Amino acid sequence: MTQFTSDRLLLFGATGDLSRRMLLPSLCALDAEGLLGSHIEIIGTARSDMDDLGFRNFAREALEQFLPANRRGGIAQFLNRLSYQPLDANDIDHFQALAEKVGTPEKGLSIFLSTAPSLFEATIHGLEKSGLAGPNVRIGLEKPLGIDLASSKVINDAVHHAFPEDRIYRIDHYLGKETVQNLLALRFANLMFEPLWNAAHIDHVQITVSETVGLESRVGYYDDSGALRDMVQNHMLQLLALVAMEPPVSYDATNVRDEKVKVLRSLRKVNVEDTVTGQYRAGAIGGQAVPGYDDELGKDSDTETFVAIKAHIDNWRWQGVPFYLRTGKRMPKRTTEIVVQFRDVPHSIFTGRGAKTVPNRLVIGLQPEENITLSLMAKVPGLDRNGYGLRSVPLAITTPDAFAGPQRRIAYERLLLDLIEGDQTLFVRRDEVEAQWEWIDAIRAGWEEQQQTPKTYTSGSWGPSAAIALAERNGVTWHE
């Protein structure tokens, strides 16, 4: 791992939507809390033709729109850090001008690259030729990193031509979420969980990522991608790996990522019968009528907007435990959660009293709220001549209630700070990416071989009825 803290941050795609909504607000919030170095400069670059003042005005509008009111106190100070240089990635002379703007990277430069995959090679070549890829430069890569294993390797090979692995930071913004990081604390800092975290005590695991939105502004990208590539390949497989990984030797980039890779390589090849795909049709979300996918797209398409998978991990810890993955657009509510369903007690002493036990369940919510809930069996208070009342009750940790501090953070705050300071723990290594793509490509190959096309589901529902059947074949009910 490179051991330097950058004194400059170069943002590619600085006038794009990701920058407006996430990157600039994250950096401003870090600055307001004193977490950015006092001398760090932030240089934006994109095709947009503007100067320093124009970029600062652009940033001010974005911050006033996307930063909560109680986090806007440092906007004026933050804007003084910003400068801008227009760039056409296909013009090598533009990179020379950018290098003059950035200055010598000897004291440490971090680059955040959010650009179209078609521009990756040209951008890396330009950085290398202009002297912006030296030993004190690290680069963060925003997805998508390919559409399959082959294209991913092309992109990674291009980046590796100028940057070694210990200076490449592949971004999955889910890993910046507090509750995702808290999953590791829950497992490895509490004695009560780790002895039970295995096939002997866990019945199954569910991971759900549901969205209420449709295509929005992602029409071109999403129709070439679909739910499997867009959501399962990265976010959901990273969540699965964190749930299933063995205890690392220590909390550092090498050991944590080594254990995640072992999980990803242990994923069993999925039978087509253990997958369900869907595409939303017209319906209603929150009482408002919404169009179907083909209507939004303006043409007929076989792209899946929903996918459910029953996955298995072939190792000692998880043998026989199904992992149910489900993601979709135009669902009833926006939520991301992990459900760990424990097995029932082997013998209940209360059956003679008419009481029924319910297995414990751990629910880890990532959005819209960050919380952890463990359901426990407890006696219902009061006197009852007819029996012994038991009820499942929640033991909950909600982040705002448990920890006094700033409002919920943007996930990119953590990731940008780690990029600047050189900590790769929450970033994805190349062998992780390739293991993920290998598993995903096999699923898509199975769909193509059996000519599987998406089943339709009504917007505002939880997907095709076949997804319910996928779980219920094993006596499992999706947590909703």
Image (cartoon, grey):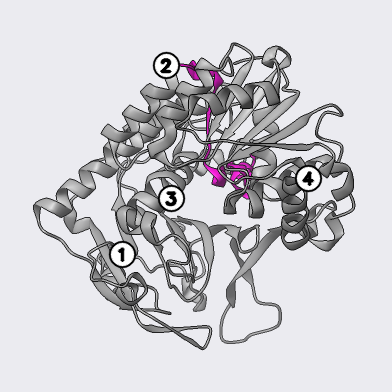
| 164 or 57, nearer to the observer | 57
In the picture of the structure, the residue carrying the numbered disc 3 is: 202
Q: Is residue 175 magenta?
A: yes
Q: CA separation, marks 4 and 3? A: 57 Å
Which numbered disc, 4 or 1, marks the residue closer to the eye? 4
Does the CB distance between marks 4 and 1 fall below 8 Å? no
Q: Earlier in the sequence, mark 3 or mark 2?
A: 2
Question: Would residue 263 be found to the left or right of residue 382 on screen?
Answer: left
In the picture of the structure, the residue carrying the numbered disc 4 is: 53
Which numbered disc, 1 or 3, marks the residue closer to the eye? 1
* Residue type indicated by callout 2: His
Locate residue 154, reporting x and y percent: 32, 28
Which numbered disc, 3 or 2, marks the residue closer to the eye? 2
* Residue type indicated by callout 4: Leu
Give the answer, above or below, for where 179 lies relative to 358: above
* Residue type indicated by callout 3: Ile
Q: CA separation, marks 4 and 1? A: 56 Å
**Going 37% across and 73% down the picture, which residue do you hit?**
296
Q: What stretch is highlighted in magenta?
A: 162-186
Q: Earlier in the sequence, mark 4 or mark 2?
A: 4
**Going 73% across and 21% down the picture, which residue do you hit?**
5
Taking the view exactly as shown, the residue that stands out farthest to the left is: 450
Q: CA separation, marks 4 and 2? A: 35 Å
In the picture of the structure, the residue carrying the numbered disc 1 is: 471
Asked whether residue 251 is in view, the answer is: no
| 342 or 66, nearer to the observer | 66
Q: Which of marks 4 and 1 is nearer the N terminus?
A: 4
In the picture of the structure, the residue carrying the numbered disc 2 is: 161
Which numbered disc, 4 or 3, marks the residue closer to the eye? 4
Q: Which of marks 1 and 3 is nearer the N terminus?
A: 3
Q: Within 10 angstroms of label 3, few (less than 14), some, or many (20 or more) residues?
A: many
